[in-house]
Amino acid sequence: MMTASSNAGIAHCTMLSNAWQTLTLNRFALHQWREVSLLHRLLAFARSWRQGSWLLQWGDAIALSVAAILFALAPYVSTTLIGILLLACSAFWLLLTVSDEAGEGLTPMHLMVISYWGVMLLATAVSPVRGAATAGLIKLTLNVLLFLLLARVLRRPPLRTSLITVYLLTALVVSVFGLRQWFFGADALATWVDPSSNLAGTTRVYSYLGNPNLLAGYLIPAVMLSGAAVFAWPRWTPKVLAALSLLVNTACLVLTFSRGGWLGFVAGGFTLAVLLVQFWSIRFNDFWRRWAIPLLLGGSAAFLVLSVAALAPLRDRVMSIFAGRDDSSNNFRINVWLAVVDMIKARPVLGIGPGNDAFNQIYPLYQKPNYTALSAYSVFLEIAVEAGLIGLTVFFWLLSVTLGQGWRLLQQLREVQSGQAYWLIAALATMAGMLVHGLVDTIWYRPQVSTLWWMMLALVASYYSSKPKRLSPEL
């Protein structure tokens, strides 16, 4: 017989569940809104034109090709060319969307991404440096449009796997060149290690990206996706290639000696392992269902502790994280963060507007002497500076919706043990890693990394309309 306290507990849990469902927009029926949309009805002529177009019958495949070129060239080309490719992706998204059928592809994540963009638009409108902020808004808009294109193209599993394969093969080339720098040496293009530390003469690889921290940010998704590819790719030859990519990408990431990258790698790797175990637990017996996660936690902690204790360079670099102001890099970041906090206090509602140009015009008014910076060295502080506390709140809401939707979709795929779930697991793990790395750096505002962040969001969104059924992973 249930007691009054147990009834109250159930009611409390139900209330929390309902609040979470509302927060993550799980109950929104956005396809119904589009079906009755006046704008969608006005564009009926475009859908008729698309049905008669031979070229647009292959629209998604052509869009994937443009996106694949973007990700294949990103590590090697200028940001200008990346911008041109982003413009091409944006144009193709517009062409496909105005001629699309009702009810396809719109998700709660789309609503939150557009809300985030809208807050940045308001921040630009009230910015004290409106011209510079407009340039930042344009860059953000191109990334948002890339998300919109990928979210619709990646709904098809073969296209999803193909784009991931293009990125992984590109990252493998980048990592191989990084390992070559480690073995044969590479000139440091800046002072990346405290000259007074034991690692002053250590080579930090940067491959084609020119900066070890940027390379680490670029490789976090590669490590997670190559780990997932070991299980998602069919046949042994692709699996061996995936395992080789995992080893090479991991080694290259470690040899960047990027402390933020290492933290992101650990966070992402831990998330990947936990989600994989949870996904497989449906096949476990009672013993492994009870002990798999505790053993994973204990084994992971023991491996990290032993690695740090056994390898002197790794130990010195990890200990420098806790050195406070005694480490020059830490001291630099702390002084930048203090100045950034003052910037947030000065404009706490909507900030100064998006983009590094706006930051560079306002930061000198608050900077500590001799601590020039191009960014806030923290993604969360950067968002608060650019769009105020309103923008930061919407960003956290976007993360909540994304993680909530991702978890719900993963459980659907878990029930049927779909092979396509591995890409969703890797996307969620990558987001965890990039967010942890973003606590102490803003390299993901560089297009080589920012495009990967929006690709991960699009990967999660692409599963929204998927029906839980057995899917054969395709290369």
Image: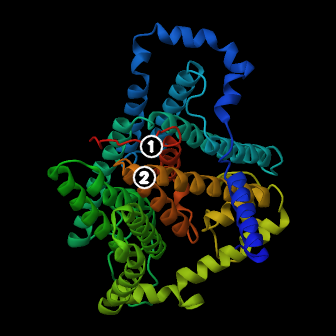
> Is 266 positioned to the left or the right of 369 in the image?
left
Mark 2: few/some/many CA within 10 Å (<14, 14-19, 20+): few
Q: Secondary structure at mark 1?
A: loop
The residue sitting at 31% across, 45% down in the picture is 165
- Secondary element type, mark 2: helix
Identify the image quadrant of residue 32.
top right
Q: Would you identify the image quadrant in which residue 10 lies?
A: bottom right
223, above or below 70, in the image:
below
Q: Is residue 233 left or right of residue 190?
A: left
Disc 2 residue type?
Answer: Glu
Task: Name the kind of residue labelled 1 in the image.
Answer: Pro
In the image, residue 376 above or below residue 156 = below
Horizontal placement of 86 versus 277: left or right? right
Q: Residue at x 21, y 54 (%)?
A: 239
Which residue position holds label 2? 415
Where residue 43 sits: x, y (%)?
65, 14
Residue for point 66% across, 74% down: 336
Which sits in the foreground, 370 or 338?
338
Say the numbered circle drawn on residue 38: none
**For the residues bearing labels 1 and 2, Cβ distance under 8 angstroms:** yes
Of residues 7 and 208, the one nearer the viewer is: 7
Residue at the disc numbered 1:
468
Q: Position of residue 371 (x, y in %)?
A: 64, 75
In percent of width and height, residue 193 lies at 44, 80
The residue carrying pointer 1 sits among few (fewer than 14), some (14 to 19) or many (20 or more) residues within 10 Å by Cα, namely some
Q: Outermost residue, left direction?
A: 237
Q: Nearer the viewer, residue 243 or 12?
A: 12
Question: Is residue 76 placed above or below 97 in the rendered structure?
Answer: below
Visible residue check, residue 200: no
| Quadrant including the N terminus | bottom right
Quadrant holding the C terminus: top left
Q: CA distance from mark 1 to mark 2?
A: 8 Å
